[in-house]
Amino acid sequence: APANGSAAERGRQVPALSIWIIDSDEADAAAMSLWLGSDPELREEGRLEIRRFRTVNEVAELAASGTPPGPPAAVVVEAGETGNGAPAIGELSELLRSDLRITAPLLAIGESLDAGMAFAHGARASLSKPLEEQRFLGALRGLLEGRRRRVLIVDADADLRLLIKRSLERRGFRADDLDRGEEALRRLRQESYDLLLLDLGLPDVSGEDFLRALHRLPSLERLPVFVMLGQDKAPPSRARLLSIGADQFVGKHGGIGGIVDAVHDFLETPLEAE
């Protein structure tokens, strides 16, 4: 095969950085799309994909279609009122989290914008119209930096790893997965992660030996570790977790959703409004 691969292969190798814009003003939406597409810092993140909607209802229709697109990295939403008088950002926030299980950060925009209301309904940042290019791009870059949390999954069960990985990515995280402890230690020495999901029953090394080796490395001694336990395993005490260098356990019997929720609750913290 050619060194560069086919167009389809190159598309798989370079993930899309997806940004949704929800704004009924076509001129503003077009300007934001142009600014995003012309920004060299965002292009460095990967293949940029901009999806535009006029209203939150269009997003709801997408959710109801049964074939929603991949999760966005960030969402820009006009924070005006909907037809029933409710804030559009409130409806959108509920729709993304409850129906689509998406936790992408929200940038609220609008004329006479009530920033307090926007933050109360889930916005991470806000800008008043008329928009200015550099302030808009700066706000988006800040949201994207905040969402780039990485999780390493280490488990011998390939199917389980894939399910957890896909679920984490759908919630806006970056996730990698490995099946062996020695390979995981090499990866952790080379790359930076925000959390490790670890099954103690690895094929090449015991979980406790792995954790001892991990915490002997100064650069990794503070890495949060969640131990994943099968349904036949009794949950360890807090003292036991601390003794082996773990922060929390998550039961596999609770399903993928419980594991992903635990990761999200631990890593996701709202950004303070300035």
Image: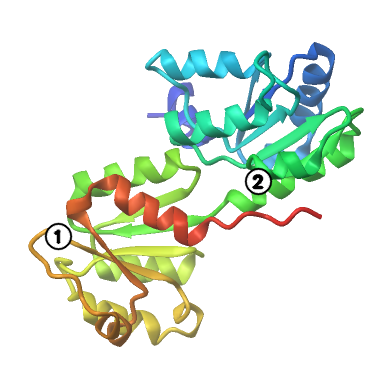
For the C terminus, the image quarter is bottom right
Q: Which residue is mark 1?
A: 230
State the residue at coordinates (41%, 57%).
263
Label 1 sits on what residue type? Gly
**Residue 271 versus residue 17: which sits nearer the camera?**
271
Q: Which mark is residue 144?
A: 2
Label 2 sits on what residue type? Leu
State the residue at coordinates (29%, 80%).
238
Cα gap from disc 2 to disc 1, whole angstroms: 34 Å
Q: Secondary structure at mark 2?
A: helix
The image shows residue 220 at horizontal and vertical percentages of 46, 77
Of circles 2 and 1, the one toward us is 1
The colouring scheme, among rainbow, by chain, secondary structure or one colour, is rainbow
Q: How many neighbours does mark 2 have within 10 angstroms: few (below 14), some (14-19), or many (20 or more)?
A: some
Residue 37 is drawn in which quadrant?
top right
Whether residue 100 is visible to the viewer of this picture, yes or no, is no
Q: Is residue 139 above or below residue 241?
A: above
- Count of number-bearing discs: 2
Q: Secondary structure at mark 1?
A: loop
Q: How many neighbours does mark 1 have within 10 angstroms: few (below 14), some (14-19), or many (20 or more)?
A: some
**Residue 204 versus residue 221: which sits nearer the camera?**
221
The image shows residue 99 at horizontal and vertical percentages of 43, 28
Farthest residue to the left: give it: 232
In this rendering, position of residue 43 left or right of residue 182: right
Dot 2 or dot 1: first in sequence order is: 2
**Residue 241 versus residue 70: which sits nearer the camera?**
241
Whether residue 63 is visible to the viewer of this picture, yes or no, is yes
State the residue at coordinates (27%, 46%).
256
State the residue at coordinates (22%, 74%).
207
